[in-house]
C-alpha cells in the first residue's frame, strides 16, 4: 500500500497522468498539448513521457517570457451613447 508521501513524490520522468497532476490540468488536455508540441515531451515506445526539469523550464518561460515591450494594456471600449426615444 502506498503512503500519501509516496503519492505526492514528483519523479524526474513522469507519465501523462503524473505530469497532468503536476501541471494541474487534465490528462486529455496534456495529451493534446504534447501531440501538438506545445509542451516539452517525448515518446518512449508509444507512450508520452515528461521530464520535470523541462516542464519547469517551460513553465518559467511561459510565465515570465514576455518582455515589457510585448505587454499590451487592453482598455474596455467606450459604449456609444444611446439616442433618446422620440
Image: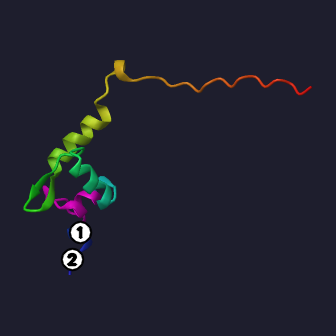
Q: Are marks 1 and 2 in contact (CB under 8 Å)?
A: yes
Q: CA distance from mark 1 to mark 2?
A: 7 Å
- Along the viewing direction, whichever of 86 and 81 lies nearer the viewer: 86
Residue 64 sits above or below residue 25 on the image: above
Q: Which residue is mark 1?
A: 7
Residue 16 sits above or below residue 40 on the image: below
Q: Which residue is mark 2?
A: 2
Could you say whether the residue bearing mark 2 is in a helix, strand or loop?
Answer: loop
- Along the viewing direction, whichever of 28 and 69 lies nearer the viewer: 28
What is the crowding at mark 2: few (fewer than 14 residues within 10 Å), some, or many (at least 20)?
few
Magenta-tinted stretch: 7-21
Horizontal and vertical percent for residue 37? 20, 45
Asked which quadrant contains residue 59, the reply is: top left
On-image quarter of the N terminus? bottom left
Horizontal and vertical percent for residue 8? 25, 64
Could you say whether the residue bearing mark 1 is in a helix, strand or loop?
Answer: helix
On-image quarter of the C terminus? top right
Amino acid at each position: 500500500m502506498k503512503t500519501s508521501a509516496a503519492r505526492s513524490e514528483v519523479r524526474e520522468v513522469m507519465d501523462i497522468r503524473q505530469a497532468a497532476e503536476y501541471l494541474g490540468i487534465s490528462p486529455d488536455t496534456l495529451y493534446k498539448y504534447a501531440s501538438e508540441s506545445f509542451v516539452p515531451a517525448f515518446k518512449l515506445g508509444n507512450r508520452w513521457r515528461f521530464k520535470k526539469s523541462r516542464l519547469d523550464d517551460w513553465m518559467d518561460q511561459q510565465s515570465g517570457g514576455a518582455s515589457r515591450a510585448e505587454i499590451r494594456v487592453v482598455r474596455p471600449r467606450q459604449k456609444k451613447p444611446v439616442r433618446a426615444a422620440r
